[in-house]
Image (cartoon, grey):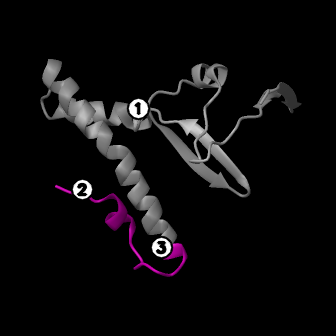
């Protein structure tokens, strides 16, 4: 099957579009240009949004928005050098699951399935 690449303009951002095939095992191949341009590695995230399927690369910098706070906390606990780096990586990996857990709990509360929580419940330390 011949695939055609089309570039559309939506507002000011170019939208590139390419027709791809789906195998009998429901597999697709991401076009090389898109794979490279978006920085895919060995995992992708699939999201259903309305009647669209969004496939995007998984970024390893999870929790980057909290990096400064994590570093401040670890330094205040006396970590430095290689030990600081090791602890930073461990702590940073916990951020995304914690945020996802908060979102799931908020969804349950919003749908009246969960218990109501307080600010302290959401942000208390697990230690």
Question: From what the image shows, is residue 79 above or below residue 120?
Answer: above
Q: Earlier in the sequence, mark 2 or mark 1?
A: 1
Residue 89 image-quadrant placement: top left
**Circles 2 and 3: CB atoms closer than 8 Å:** no
What is the span of residues highlighted in magenta in the rendered image?
109-127
Above or below 90: residue 40: above
Q: Which residue is mark 1?
A: 60
Which label was assigned to residue 39?
Answer: none
Is residue 45 or residue 98 the one in the foreground? 45
Q: Measuring 19% from the left and 32% from the top, which residue is drawn there?
A: 87
Tell me the number on the disc at residue 125.
2
Foreground mark, 2 or 1, reads: 1
Read off the residue under disc 3.
108
Q: For the residues marked 2 and 3, what is the alpha-carbon distance in whole angstroms?
A: 21 Å
- In the image, 69 versus 34, the foreground residue is 34
**Residue 111 pos. (x, y %):** 54, 77
Secondary structure of the residue carrying tag 3 is helix
The quadrant of the rendering that contains the N terminus is top right
């Amino acid at each position: 099957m011949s695939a055609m690449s089309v570039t559309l303009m939506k507002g000011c951002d170019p939208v590139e579009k390419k027709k791809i095939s789906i195998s009998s095992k429901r597999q697709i191949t991401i076009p090389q240009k898109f794979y490279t341009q978006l920085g895919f590695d060995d995992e992708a995230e699939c999201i259903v949004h309305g009647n669209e399927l969004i496939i995007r690369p998984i970024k390893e910098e999870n929790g980057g928005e909290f990096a400064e706070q994590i570093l401040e906390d670890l330094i205040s606990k006396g970590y430095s050098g290689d030990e600081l780096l090791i602890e930073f990586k461990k702590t940073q990996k916990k951020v995304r699951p914690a945020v996802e857990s908060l979102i799931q709990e908020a969804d349950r509360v919003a749908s009246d399935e969960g218990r109501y929580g307080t600010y302290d419940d959401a942000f208390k330390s697990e230690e």
